[in-house]
Each structure stands twice: as structure tokens, then as C-alpha cells.
Amino acid sequence: MKKARRKGAVAGGNGSYTGEGRQPGPGGTIFGSVQVDLRESWWIGGVEIPTRLVLAPMAGVSVQAFRRQGRRYGAGLVCSEMVSCAGLEHRNERTLGYLRVGRDEHPLAIQIFGSDPGVMAEAARMVVAAGADIVDINFGCPVRKVTKTGAGATLLDDPSRACAIVDAVASAVDVPVSVKMRRGLEDGSRACLIVGPQLVAAGAATLTLHPRSARQMYTGVADHSLTAELVELVDVPVIASGDVTSRARAQSVLALTGASAVMVGRGAQGNPWALREIVDGDPEEPSREEVAAELILFVRETVRELGEHRAGGFLKKFYGWYLGRGRFPKPFKQEIVQLETTDEVVTRLFAAAPGAAEIVERLEAYLASPSDEPVMVIHMTCMGKPDRIIEVRGDNAADRR
Ligand SMILES: Cc1cc2nc3c(=O)[nH]c(=O)nc-3n(C[C@H](O)[C@H](O)[C@H](O)COP(=O)(O)O)c2cc1C
């Protein structure tokens, strides 16, 4: 297959401003007059991204409900959490479950991680068959479980392997390939500036930089002066990830770096309203009814996706994220976390905010149920294995010969 477009990726790319040039101030922070229109669309290869806000991939967070909600609240691009290419190779049922794609998620990137170019290429074919508009490659994960296999951020120390992976993936699929990386492994590292241009030459149509070191994990601050340097070095769009939680911060990062878009991660956890504030400048805090309604929808959708058993544990952290921030009293939050079933959670939320019922009804009528139809059917021969038909439905995953 042909390589993903490289140069075309620049269209609508880095640095489209309605004000003066970049204005870095002391410490690399700027709060100047430069304003970027976050509602402006831009392109990654042939894929149009309707806004300049990208919802971050987050393991243990970026379920379908999170992504669909992100799109509704203004994210121009959403991303799956990282999916193991080894898990896909072995048709691990849980891994295949990550390949559910809803009609209302597009444009969607599915992120894969691994260290073997051939296996990554095969995984890329599978995620495209599942409906991904973009294949994202993870060169940023700092977690030992991943790095000890030679994947994630470790690849920033092995540029030739990293390039071989990007080349293999870009040659395997017709959609654009993106790479998400950290600044490097160690504090102060500038590896991203050396590896980044090489990854573009190997076929990456866009780069996302989270400018912390792997060692830093999530401590300290994201040093977006590196993002600005990267933008200068490559002719593809760059996405700035790290510490963007408000419109003011998004504007300052875009102005400082000249990046095409900002990526928002932790700021959107239990808080889709932050996305609305960033994209549209709408600062209105949600009412209790709105919070309860979005949480109820999130719970129901996640139970459909993961099943009651997995969803029960998975959702606990979301209760804190949604109900905190002074939206509900602390004892109420504690009570919700203690409840045994998600049905009890929903009942209790409706009791606490009766007005939520009307909002939920409206939202559910508007949203297509993800379990209505099969969202992925793949017929393929993979890695020398016999032909398989793999079906992933909204509510279950099956792999059969
Ligand atoms: C819980 C959690 C899980 C994450 N999982 C992933 C992942 O699967 N893939 C990835 O590329 N980055 C992952 N990240 C990093 C985020 O995508 C993002 O780059 C980082 O959180 C910085 O952005 P923020 O300050 O907006 O959160 C994760 C971050 C968090 C907090």
C-alpha cells in the first residue's frame, strides 16, 4: 500500500493566527494578544479535523463514552487509549474490544504500541479495518510494563527502530500515521527534536509532543518551548500536549508554539465542560442536573461497552471526577462510590437531581446506541494465521474462525 501523505499534512497546519506573531514571555509563558480560532478546521493528511482541540489518549479513561462525549463538547479529534499490537496479534478478546468505533466518533485515531515493525504494521491494518481515520503510534508511554518490552518512550532512544516502525506502519495503511512522544527519557532530554524530523521523513503525517521526560511521568510542568522548537523543525502539523486546562492556557500554548492544535487530557476527566470552554469560550459551569445527566449517560454507555463487572470498578474514579469540584457535597460522592451496582448509582443520581431525567432522555434519543450494529467486521489473514472473521459489536467481542 502507498505511504500516508506527508507534505499534504501541512494544509491548514501549524500557526494560523488572527493576531501578531508568537510572543514568548519570561519562562516561556505568554499571555499575549495573539488569538487562535479554535473552531477553525485543519488537516492531518487527507483527514479534516474540525477544531483545534484534540482529546488525549488516556489508558483506563478513553473509553467510547469518553470519546463520544469529547466530540459532542468540541474535540475535533478523539483518540483511543493505547492498544497493544501483541494483544491484537494474539486476538486477545479484551484488546479487540478496544477496536469498537461508533459512527459519531469520527475523526478518530486509534493508538497502537509495540516494538516490532512487522507486528505494528499488521496491527495498523486491523485498526484501520475497524474504522480508524488515523493510526497513532505511541512513543511516549513511560510505564515500565511497556518500556521493558522496548515499546513506548524507550523508542526515543532508538531512532532507527522508531523510524522502521513508522515506515512499516505508513507503508501498510492508506490513512495518515501520527506519532505521540515525550521529550525524551531523562529530564532535560531534547531527544524529541532529533527523532521528530526523522519520524516525519519515515512517514509520520503529524507529531504530538508531551514535553515532559519519561522519568518525570506527570510531575513538573510541560516545557512547551520544546514544542515551539519542534514546530520550527518539521513541515507537518504538531499537536501540543500537556497542562492545557483552560481557553487562556490553550491560547497561550498555541501562540507560544505555533502548533496546529492543543491536546487536552486530565482537564477533561469528568469535565467535558472544559472542552466547551476551551473551544467556544463558554465559561458557564454545568448545573447539578447536567452533571448528573452526563454521568448517567457515561455510566450506561460504559456498562454496555465493558459489561457490568468491569465497568463497576472502572467507573469509580469517574464518580469522583464528575461529582467533585464542589458540584455535589463530599458525603454524596462518598456514598456513590460505595454503591455496589451501577443501577444503584443511576437511581441515586436521579434521586439527587430529578431534572436530569429529561436531559438524559433527550441525549439518549439524540445519540445512536453503539450496540445497534456491528461496528467492525474484519476478514483477513494475519501474521500467517488462517483466515479469520473477527467481529466486534457494541456490546460484545467475538473472534471465530
Ligand atoms: C491516566 C492517563 C493515561 C494516559 N494514557 C496514555 C496513553 O494510553 N497513550 C498516550 O499517548 N498518552 C497517554 N497519557 C498521556 C496523555 O495523553 C497526555 O499526553 C498527558 O496526560 C499530558 O496532557 P494533560 O496535561 O492534558 O493531561 C495518559 C495520561 C494519563 C493521565
Image (cartoon, rainbow, N blue to C red):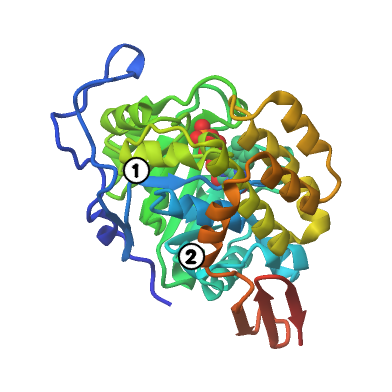
**Residue tagged by mark 1?**
261
Whether residue 197 is visible here, answered yes or no, is yes
Residue 149 falls left or right of residue 213: right
Q: Nearer the viewer, mark 1 or mark 2?
A: 2
Q: Secondary structure at mark 1?
A: strand
Q: Amino acid at mark 2?
A: Tyr
Residue at label 2? 366
Q: Residue furthest top?
A: 26
Ligand 1 is within 8 Å of the C-beta of the residue at disc 1: no
Give me the disc on residue 270. none
For the point 26% across and 59% down, the residue is 7
In this rendering, position of residue 267 left or right of residue 393: left
- Is residue 165 something that shows in the picture? no
**Residue at position x 45%, y 30% from top?**
245
Residue toward you, 269 or 291: 291
Q: Label 1: how many residues lie within 10 Å, few (<14), some (14-19) or many (20+)?
A: many
Q: Whole-percent x and y of residue 8?
A: 26, 61
The amino acid at mark 1 is Ala
Residue occupying image coordinates x 70% and y 70%: 395
Classify 399 as above or below 135.
below
The percent coordinates of residue 13 (x first, y second) are 25, 49
